[in-house]
Image (cartoon, rainbow, N blue to C red):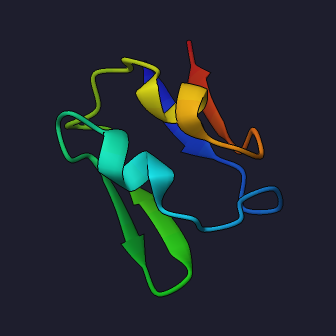
Amino acid sequence: MAVKNNAEKCCYCGGCVGCCPVMAIELKDIRIMIDNEKCTSCGNCVKICPVGAMEVLR
């Protein structure tokens, strides 16, 4: 499984970065970078995203 960020919806608040227990998400410049090798698909980023830009792909 993997997580995807919808850049068109994203407000780049960084909430997903801080809530990731395995540090798989980074905010670089104005892009959310997701390391799907590290990601455990826990869904924390989906729950915290205020604009619904994060999605767990199954």
- Rendered image quadrant of residue 28: bottom left
Quadrant of the rendering where the N terminus is positioned: top left
Q: Is residue 44 visible?
A: yes
Quarter that holds the C terminus: top right
Q: Residue at x 57, y 65 (%)?
A: 13
Q: How many marks?
A: 0
Residue 35 can be seen in this image: no
Q: Is residue 4 above or below residue 1?
A: below
**Image quadrant assignment for residue 39:** top left
Residue 22, position in %: x, y? 17, 37
Where residue 23 sits: x, y (%)? Answer: 20, 47
User: Residue at image x 70%, y 44%?
Assistant: 50
Query: What residue is at 54 percent from the left and 73 percent from the top?
Result: 31
Residue that protrudes farthest toward the bottom in the picture: 29
Q: Relative to 33, is 26 on the left or the right?
A: left
Q: Nearer the viewer, residue 19 or 40?
A: 19
In this picture, residue 39 sits left or right of residue 27: left
Q: Residue 14 location, x and y as percent?
A: 47, 62
Outermost residue on the right side: it is 8
- Specify the farthest residue to the top: 58
Look at the picture and state if 13 lies above or below 38.
below
Q: Position of residue 29 (x, y in %)?
A: 47, 87
